Amino acid sequence: MISGGGTGGHIYPAIAIANAWKEKHPASEILFVGALGKMEMQKVPEAGYKIKGLPVAGLQRSLSLENLKFPFKLLKSLTQASQIIKDFKPDAVVGVGGYASGPVLYAAQRKGIPTLVQEQNSYAGLTNKILAKKAKKICVAYPDMDRFFPTDRIAYTGNPVRKDILDLSGKRENAFTHFGLDPAKKTLLVLGGSLGARTLNHAVLKDMQILEEEGYQVLWQCGKFYFQEMKSKLSDSGLKSIYLNEFIREMDLAYAAADVIVSRAGALSVSELSLVGKPVIFIPSPNVAEDHQTKNAMAYVSHDAALLLKDSEAVGALEQEVTKLMKDSSLASLLGKNIKNLAKPNAANAIVEEVEQLIV
């Protein structure tokens, strides 16, 4: 049983773990448990797995009447999780974070079923810290996580990522053709996630004319919330080397085309970018719990494996950082080499091996 979700950063590693498990144990049954109304309820069935939903939801940071419902939803979710476990009879339960993870792992631990926590970030969330107290194994994506978890139960496995980015060799020419890019120009790839990132979009808007004048082209994923606004502003600019996309599905080709990458620092993004091995400028989102994106980014910056630009400084400073990497090939090469050294390409299989040890 695999539980959790809420964001792609939880769901895609969960599906990668399920795929790796199914590859080794094709006859076994896998059941996901997620939160009703969250994206896992769509993405997991699309990946070919069954999922059950719980009514659990998080506390709102602002004063809200929804918070009054929280204890009732949690209690109902605990009861339902217990029943789902009773019916499914799992040999082990994996929690990947997200609202559903808490009640499911808590219920499993009360029944004596071995549990594994997969912590994607460099700063452990409150739920995982609580669940880890009785978990048999905690799989982490960053070193030095003994600040949060018992050392003897930590496995440094990395975050599972999609297979198509494990090898980008030979894809660069295809990438230029696919996106209509100019092979003679250096390419900046800007990623703000599927929904988009306001700061990244406004930073590109402010600097896109200078970037084009410098001879660079920009492959830009702006997100669905901002697409119409960005499209309108770009069409008014008359610029020819800014390639706007609402969402990029062929991420392997986007990575292959890039010379420099600008990205938020969500756990999944950071893990993917370490495998890609290109120079990266992280602009962490300030709108996340415990500022964990900054902590994710700093784990790489401290190893000379990426640059960091604060969200509050990005608009107006992006072009300068990009140009520095485009023109300083030795710095770009150093960052690309160091970030690749931190990659964990076999994370999903490593986690599967840890689960196998729990069941034996």
Image (cartoon, rainbow, N blue to C red):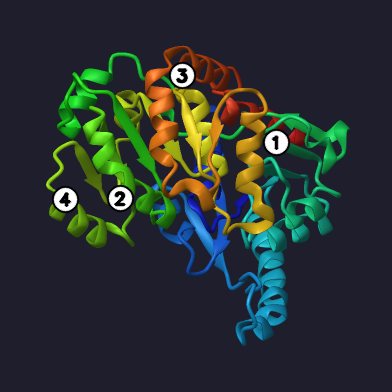
User: Does any portion of residue 27 appear in the rendered image?
Assistant: no
Q: Earlier in the sequence, mark 2 or mark 1?
A: 1
Residue at disc 1, secondary structure? strand
CA gap between label 4 and label 1 equals 45 Å
Q: Quadrant of the C terminus?
A: top right
The residue positioned 55% from the left and 46% from the top of the image is 310
Residue 28 placement, left or right of 163: right
Horizontal side of residue 264 vs 319, given as left or right: right
Query: Are discs 4 and 2 less than 8 Å apart at CB?
Result: no
- Residue 348 in which image quadrant: top right
Any mark on residue 38, and which?
A: none
Name the N-terminal-most of marks 3 and 2.
2
Q: Which residue is mark 1?
A: 140
Q: Which residue is mark 2?
A: 205
- Which residue is identified by label 3? 332
Residue that carries the numbered disc 4 in the rendered image: 237
Mark 4 vs mark 2, CA separation in Å: 10 Å
Q: Are marks 4 and 3 in contact (CB under 8 Å)?
A: no
Foreground mark, 4 or 3? 4
* Mark closer to the chain start, 4 or 3: 4
At x 59%, y 28%, the residue is 347
Rendered location of residue 152, percent (x, y): 87, 31
Q: Amino acid at mark 1?
A: Val
Give me the residue at 50% from left, 17% from top. Answer: 331
Mark 4 nearby-residue class (10 Å; few <14, some 14–19, many ≥20): few
Q: Label 4 to label 3, Cα distance in Å?
A: 30 Å
Q: Residues within 10 Å of mark 2 (few under 14, many from 20)?
A: some
Closer to viewer: mark 4 or mark 1: 4
Q: Is residue 143 above or below residue 264?
A: above
Disc 2 secondary structure class: helix
